[in-house]
Each structure stands twice: as structure tokens, then as C-alpha cells.
Image: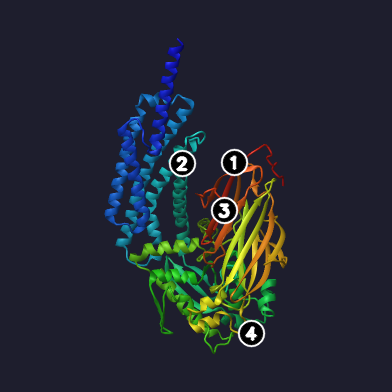
Amino acid sequence: MLKQRIVHRRRQRSLAIGLVVAAVGLLAIAEGFRYADAYHNVSDGKDRLLSAARLMEDRGLDIQGSELDAAEQSYRQAHSDLDAAFGTIGSDPLTFLGRRLPWLGAQIGAAEDLLDIGKEGTDIGLATVEAMRSYQAVRDTQAGPLSERVTLLLETVQPHAERVEQGLVAVEARRRAMSDDGLVSPIDSALADLDYHIQELRDRLDNYRRASRLAPALLGQDGPRTYLILAHDNTEMLGSGGFILVYGLLTLDRGKITRLYFDDVHSIYHDWRQRTGEYIEPPRPLKGYLLRDWSMGLGEASWWPDFPTVAEQAIELYRRESGNDEPIDGAIGINFYTLEKLLAVTGPVTVEEYGVTVDSGNVTEQTLIITHPEAARPWETDRYDFAAYLAEEVINRAMGIGPSQWTAMLEVTNALGEEKNLLLYLRDPQAQQAVAELGWDGRVQRTEGDYLMVADSSLNSTKLNLVVQPSIDLTVSLDDLGNARNTVAITYSNDYSTWARNQDPYLAALVVGQSTLTVYGDYLRLLVPPGSSLLEVREGDTSVGAEDVWQEHGKTVVGRYFALPIDSQKTLTFTHTVPAALDTSRDPFVYRLLVQKQPGTAAVPLHIKVEAPRWAKVVSLELDGQPVGLDSLGVETDLRRDRTLVVRLTPQRSEIPRRREG
């Protein structure tokens, strides 16, 4: 009897092992799956599904018709392969028995769920193929500029987007019903990949919905819309991207430009001052380091790093200075990076009034040289006429782009918005909500968890932001109570001589100032969570303290001015604490950090290091939703766009911090 029980147990063990191999092999496409046909079906289905998805991702909206046909065929065959594999597994007696074993049943159930999700994924892929075909049909049959066809494009794609939405909702529901507990590594890894792709598809679909809500209001589908355009000079930084060189008025009616002109901000400023004598008090650092007794004007409206604040201030200042009371429906912020990217699509533009041709590689330098002629005086407003003519020509060309370049323009527009080099503010609340959800509003974000924004303002009348290279090093130390002690070190390198060797001598001279100034003067603002406590500010090795600490845009703001001579480097270090930065209400605990990009800046290097509490172990690290290795708990990235870091921790012993109240 004992021998029979031993044999029986061995048979049960063999059965369980066989089922484990089947379940794991099914999902991970590993060797050892029980049935060769099912193995090949899963393998082929996965390969075809991924191949079609990669093709469509790589080729984008310009994918060829023959390539769309190939993608459609791959999706259909992938569905057939996965369906066949599901049938084989569903009819397998071994699988039937395995489902009734607690642990093994969870592995098999997860594998079957993933197969079903894979089949749903092929249907989503087919709907995407049809959406692409619909877009291309409009592009290939409709004449006229993109701005007049955007609404038609969105409406044409809508039925296919609804099919994608239905499929995605089904996948999300299936995924939520799945348990992640106790799954073997291959299945767990596959689920992590699935979660990333679900979120990626959800983000894209949500952006389509936002664009569908935004476009009609922005383009004036139900009546003309007029916008104040703010052209920032990001070689001379202020909060939202730079001093405003020129302003413009743009009126759109059903996507068609009915008015577009630009003028120098100083032209209306001086007329206003002479006409009224009115004085507007500037913020203290702007007054103390730059304007002195001058009134604040439209050119300085970009002082704030929060673009909705800037837009409202700019609209009000424009009305006061110009005396124009016509309704303004919003504001659009652009800068030199905007012009560079638009010119990369439109090609070179000639400013006929000056006989000068600019392209994406020289637009910044040419504009600086022409708008700062040797004999000019600061109060001579006509020297900025070139910038006005140029902005008008580039925007006209960009909005009138033909069908062959629609895709490139859509991609560039999306990149400009994401990188905060195109900012939108609409007074229509619903449309502005869509702008905010797209991340194109340039507002200071109000989020849970930790937060950081570094905002530079050049207050020494130089163009040295063309030269000065900042980098940010952030160390986050989480203490035993879940508070964060943050050390933010910002290093500025002003390697002017190296830069100047390869530049036009006149450009090199004007960049360091129109007088004898040879230093970069920066009023640096650090925006951190409300309730943060400043511990120290250091300039190099010297403790200097903060000049100003105040509350603005829902943040604590710390300000400090510093001077940086040419061919030198300087580090400013801020140390502050953030209470209850670790969310202990979740399992595992979560530390979340948003580092927000200042509009108009380049891809500033960013290094983040997180030090866990003594009692905790870091179990995962994500940057913008992507897993990061845990080797050093350090992340190297840049601020081409906003960055979100998420750290998950679990206690290693019983010393768990109690949640702070209040």
C-alpha cells in the first residue's frame, strides 16, 4: 500500500509538473510546451501580432497602402493562430485537471486570459489599420491646408476610434479581473509588458479624444477665434520661455487664417507710457535686477513659469498698452525652438522685406544679428521688424502646409506641445481642459507626491542662454517617517570662448550684452511642494541662503540671484524637506516625483537618486511608466519634457512608519 501511495504521489507530481510546463510555455513561448501545434500557433501568432504592430508604429501615418495590406493580413492570421492555440488548450484534459489545482489553476487561467487579450489585440490592430486608411483617403483626396481639414480628419477616423475604444475597454476589464499574486516569472513579465502597452494605447486614444474636443474650438469651427501670440526670446530666459520680443494677433475662422500680423512689443509700450503715464509695479526681482524705474510691460509678462498666468497677464497688458478692447479668445506661446521645428517641415523661408533666407539651422542666429544692428539703440523699435515679418511668414507657411506634409506637421506639433515649445491658453473652459489634458497648457502642475521645477530668468541684458548649459542633480533621502530630504544641485557652465570660436564674430559679441556686461545674471527659482521647509542654499561651497521664499501656483517658491562670468562654472545647491512624501496608504508604499520642464529650455540633463528608509526595500523603479534597473537607484535622463519617477517600497522589518495626519 505504501508503495502504491508513493507511485500515486509521483504520478500526481509528474502531472503537476507537466501542467506547469504547459502553462508557462504557453505564455512565455518557451520550449517544452506539451503540444507542438499549440506551441507553433502561439509562437506564430505572437510574432505576426508584434510584427504588424511594429510596422505600423515605425511607419506612422505615412505607411504605404501595400504595407497596410500586409499588416491587416498579419493581424488576421495572428487571430487565427491564437484562436487555434486557445482551442487546443481548452480541449486538453491535462489543462482541465490543472485548473482545479489552486496554484497551477492560477497559472493556466492567466495564460488563457492572455491568449484572449491577444485575440482582442488583433481586432484592435485591424481597427487601427482602417483608421489609417481613412486618414490617408482624406489626405489623398482633399486639397487645402491642414488647419482647414483637421476637423474632417478627426470625424472620419471617429468610427474606427470607437472600435478601438470598445476593444481596449474589454482588454482593461479582463486585465483588472486577473490576479498578479503568485504568478511564475514569465507570466508576471508578460503582464508587465501588457500593462505598459495597455497604458500606451490608452494614452493615444485619450489624446485623440482630447484633440477631437479641442480642434473645433481652437480653429473657430463655430465662429472666428482671435489669439494673442507671444513670441518668446529663449536666448534671454524668463519664466514661460523668455522675454517677449514681438506679439501677434491671429484670427481663425473654420481653420482659415483671416488675420495674422506681428509687431514689436516696445512700439505699443512707449506709446502707452507717453499717452497715459501709467506705471505697473514689476515683481521684486524683475524690478530690482533689471527694470529699476521702468514700468512692467507686455515684454515682461512672461515672468511667471505658469503659462495660464502669463496669458492672462499678457492679454490684460496688451489691452492697456494698445487701447484695443476687441475680444481675445486666448494666447499662444512660441519661441526659437518652435520656429526651428516648423522650418524643418516647411523648408527655408525668405523674408522679402530684408532679402534674407532662414532655415531651421540658422533662424536663431540670423534673427539675433538682424534685430541687433550695430548702430541701434535699445529704444528703437523698428529693429524688431524682421522678427515680426519672420514669425508671420513661418506661421503662414506652417498652417498652409499641403497634404504631402500633413503627417510631418502633425508629428512636429505634437512634439512641440509635449516639449513645452508650443503653449496654448484658451478662455473656453472645456477647450482649455482638453489643452491641459494634452499637457500643452504650460501650467505648473498640482499633483500628489513630490515635485520640482527649476526656473531660470536672465536679468542682466545678455543672450547667454544660447551658451549657458545647466544640469540638475537631485538626491532624495526618505527618512524613517516617510519624509523626504531633497538636495537639488544645479550646475551652470558658461563655456563662452569655446562656443564663440565657431560663431559669427558679431553674434559672439552681441550675445554677451550690448554694453560692457560679460556675466550671465540669473534669478533662479525653485518650485517645490507646499509645506516644504528650506534648510540651506549654497553657492559653491558657501552658504548664502535664499533671497525670497513665497507661495505661488500652489507651490513653495525659493528664489536666489547669482552671477556667472564667461568661461566659468557654478553650482547652486538647495536643501529642503518635503513632509509625508512617501504614501504609506498603498501596498507597496509609493514615492512619486514629478520634475517639470521650464518652457523654452532645451533637454537639460537630469540625474535623480533615491535613498530608501532604513526599514524599507525598493521593489520597483519607473521613469515615465518604464521600468528602471534597481542597481543604483539612480536615474539618468533629461528634461526634454516633464519626467515622472515612481518608486515602490516594502518594509523589511516591523518598523513601519505610522501615517502622518494632517
Sequence order check: which comes first, mark 3 or mark 4?
4
Looking at this rendering, what residue extends furthest in the left direction? 66
Q: Nearer the viewer, mark 3 or mark 4?
A: 3
- In the image, 626 versus 119, the foreground residue is 626
Q: Which residue is mark 2?
A: 189
Residue indicated by mark 1: 588
Q: Residue furthest front?
A: 3
Mark before the other along the chain sequence, 1 or 3: 1
Q: Is residue 113 above or below residue 406?
A: above
Say the numbered circle drawn on residue 634. 3
Q: Assess whether mark 4 and mark 3 are in contact (beta carbons under 8 angstroms).
A: no
CA distance separating discs 2 and 1: 18 Å
Q: Is residue 182 left or right of residue 570?
A: left
Q: Amino acid at mark 2?
A: Ser
Q: Is residue 316 visible?
A: no
Total count of labels = 4
Left or right of 622 in this view: 574: right
**Residue occupied by mark 4:** 274
Q: CA distance from mark 3 to mark 4?
A: 56 Å
Closest to the observer: 456 or 315? 456
**Of label 3 and label 2, which has the lower sequence position?**
2
Q: Residue at x 39, y 52 (%)?
A: 158
Does residue 123 appear left or right of residue 531 in this picture?
left
Asked if labels 2 and 3 touch by Cβ distance under 8 angstroms, the answer is no
- Residue 526 in the image, given as x and y percentages of width and height: 65, 63
Task: Give the spatial CA distance, label 4 vs label 1.
Answer: 64 Å
Q: Secondary structure at mark 2?
A: helix
Amino acid type, callout 3: Gly
